[in-house]
Structures are given as C-alpha cells and as structure tokens.
Amino acid sequence: MTGGSRVMLLPVFALVLVSGVLGIQLAHGGGSFAPLRPADPCAVRDVTSQVGGIDGLTERLVLLGLDGAACRLHVSREALTLELAQAGTPSDADIEALRAGLLSAVQRMKAADTLPRASDLVDEALDSTDLNSFVKAAIRALPDSVVDTALKTDDVLTRTIDDLDLRTLLANVDDEQSLTQQLDAAVTQAVKDSLTARLRDLL
C-alpha cells in the first residue's frame, strides 16, 4: 500500500473508531443527556479525606455539616453552598442550620466510629501553638490513656462548634470554594486551640 493510500484511509479509520465508541455509549444508555441530579443531602453517605489528622477530620466534618444543614433547609448541598457564598450577610435560619448540621456531623462520625482519639491529635495541636517547650514536653509526656480519659474528641468538636462565630465567618466569603476553605481553616484552628487549652488543664 502506498503512502498516499494510507493517508486517504486515515479519515475512514477514524470514522470507524468514532462510530464504535458512539455505539457502545448508546448501548449503555449514553443517548440520554439528562443532567445529573444533586445528591440527596439527607442520605447517609461515607465522606473521606485525602489528608489525615485534624485537617482531614475537619474536612469531613464540614462536608457532613453542610449536608446536614442542606437537609434541614430542604435544599441540595450545592444550592446551600452557592447561597451562603453569595448571600453577604447570612440569615438566622442559615446560621442555625449550619451549626446544627455541624453538631449532627459530630454525632454521625461518633456513631460510625470514625472519630480519632484525642491522643492522636495532641502532637499536631501542639505544633501550631506558641507554648514554651517545657509545657509542650510536659503535655506530650502525658500517657495516651490519661488524655483519652480526660478528653473526648466529640466533646472537643462540640464545644468548638458552639463557640464558632459562624456569622462573621460566612460574611467574609465571596465564592463557593472560599466558603469551604474558610470553614475548614476556621474549624481546624478552633479545634487545635480548644484541644491545647484543655490539655494544659491536665497538667
């Protein structure tokens, strides 16, 4: 076969390939172009994180919290996130739903046994503080059993959520991405602060 014949056959070969792919798509329902429906925020689902420690914990907490808030408001999580990012000043209903959603997320993770022990979070919390080295060393010397008996992760999270100034936090977001980023960052820092303060009380 000459070079010219090969060139002429390339479009035909490409057409056959495209037709084959389209045929497979149609055979598996690909002919329907209906948009995907948003996930039901009230449905129980697993939420995982690519990171560990406090960052991973708060990422899961925020996602489940937004689900819980959306469920209470009878909207999708996507619709709620968009509304919160564009609202400027959040409504009392939005604030109450978000706080309730976050608190509910703590209980869901506790029931699913996916909350880390408080002792697993000690080093990360201490690394972000300006405590002197002697206090840090004393806290790190505490046995895990003492820390876990005195501090329960769900209790630390609940107290943290109760103390969050969600109205101020939400007033400073201007898009959907910054909403989750600021929630993650605020909850993460609040958890570290709360955990560190309560660890100091154990000394």
Image (spheres, grey):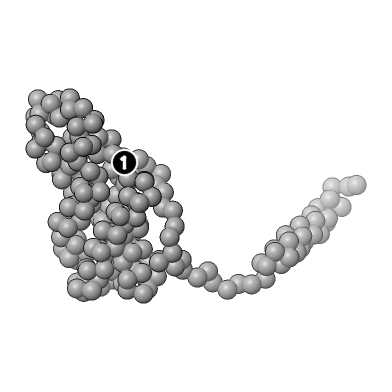
> Residue 121's quadrant in the figure?
top left
Q: Secondary structure at mark 1?
A: loop
Q: Position of residue 169 (x, y in %)?
A: 19, 61
Number of numbered discs: 1
> Residue 134's quadrant in the figure?
top left
Residue 15 vertical position relative to residue 58 in the rendered view, above or below: below
Residue at the spot 31% in from the left edge and 66% down from the top edge:
69
Residue 2 vertical position relative to residue 173 in the rendered view, above or below: above
Residue at the spot 19% in from the left edge and 73% down from the top edge:
92
User: Front-most of 49 and 68?
Assistant: 68
Q: Position of residue 142 (x, y in %)?
A: 17, 27
Q: Is residue 56 left or right of residue 193?
A: right
Residue annotated with mark 1 = 116
Q: Is residue 176 visible?
A: no
User: Front-most of 96 and 169?
Assistant: 96
Classed neighbour count for the residue bearing mark 1: other residues with Cα under 10 Å, few (<14), some (14–19), many (≥20): some
Residue 194 vertical position relative to residue 15 in the rendered view, above or below: above
Q: Quadrant of the C terminus?
A: top left
Q: Is residue 36 visible?
A: yes
Q: Is residue 155 left or right of residue 15?
A: left
Q: Of all residues shown, which one is farthest toward the right?
A: 1
Q: Position of residue 43 (x, y in %)?
A: 43, 64
Q: Position of residue 22 (x, y in %)?
A: 72, 64
User: Front-most of 98 and 13?
Assistant: 98
**Amino acid type for the residue under numbered disc 1:** Pro
Residue at the spot 19% in from the left edge and 32% down from the top edge:
146
Q: Is residue 102 left or right of residue 92?
A: right
Residue at the spot 25% in from the left edge and 64% down from the top edge:
100
Residue 72 vertical position relative to residue 12 in the rendered view, above or below: below
